[in-house]
Image: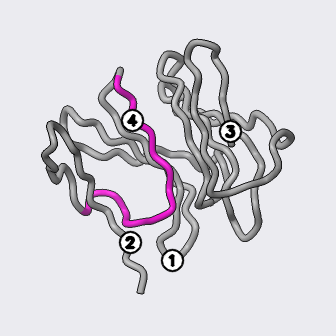
Amino acid sequence: DTAFLSDLWKLSTNRWTLVSNGSVPSRSSHVGVWDSLNGALWIHGGFDGVLRQDIWKFEAEGSTWFSIDGNDGPSARAHHVAALDAMNGVIWIHGGYDESLLGDLWKFDTRTYAWNLISTLGPTARAHHVAVWDTLNQALWIH
């Protein structure tokens, strides 16, 4: 029996606090990045019985979720990766699964809410992998 969750928790000074519950559709196998410069959590995609392609922003200052219109972005998917380039306001999304393995690379601008397909060539299509952004060298690492 699979339970899809929508609660958001914060760990600070070894203490858990429930920050939000039920304000964003429940899901699993999605990705998230924290933007320290703007105090925002971004989540994308996942699975709630069907694959999702939506993107949400949580603004910590007001404890508010916002649904961002992202239908011109990546297909619905789960088990993908995300990395944040905070200095340039960009979220990188790679791969995942949507009935088959994906190998596409997308860039989401957190200032304009615009998606751009960067590449369908590159690393072998994959899911359940990891990605990190190297700020110093302006590079995306995928393993």
Disc 4 or 1, which lies upstream in sequence?
4
Q: Residue at x 79, y 53 (%)?
A: 125
User: In 3D space, how far apart are the residues under numbered discs 1 and 3 (Cα atoms)?
Assistant: 28 Å
Location of mark 1 (residue): 49
Q: Give the residue type that dot 4 points to.
A: Trp
Local secondary structure at mark 1: loop
Disc 2 or 1, which lies upstream in sequence?
2
Local secondary structure at mark 4: strand
- What colour scheme does the image use? one colour
Location of mark 2 (residue): 4
Q: Is residue 19 left or right of residue 93?
A: left
Query: Label 1 near label 2: C-beta < 8 Å?
Result: yes
Q: Residue furthest top?
A: 136
Disc 1 or 3, which lies upstream in sequence?
1
Local secondary structure at mark 3: strand
User: In 3D space, how far apart are the residues under numbered discs 4 and 1 (Cα atoms)?
Assistant: 26 Å
Magenta: predominant secondary structure element?
loop
The magenta segment: 22-36
Q: Is residue 16 left or right of residue 103?
A: left
Of labels 1 and 3, the one closer to you: 3
Q: Give the residue type that dot 2 points to.
A: Phe
User: In 3D space, how far apart are the residues under numbered discs 3 and 4 (Cα atoms)?
Assistant: 18 Å
Q: Quadrant of residue 91?
A: top right
Q: Which mark is residue 142?
A: 3
Q: Which mark is residue 34?
A: 4
Local secondary structure at mark 2: loop
**Is 10 located above or below residue 109 in the figure?**
below
Disc 4 or 2, which lies upstream in sequence?
2
Of labels 3 and 2, the one closer to you: 3
**Is 36 located above or below residue 18 in the figure?**
above
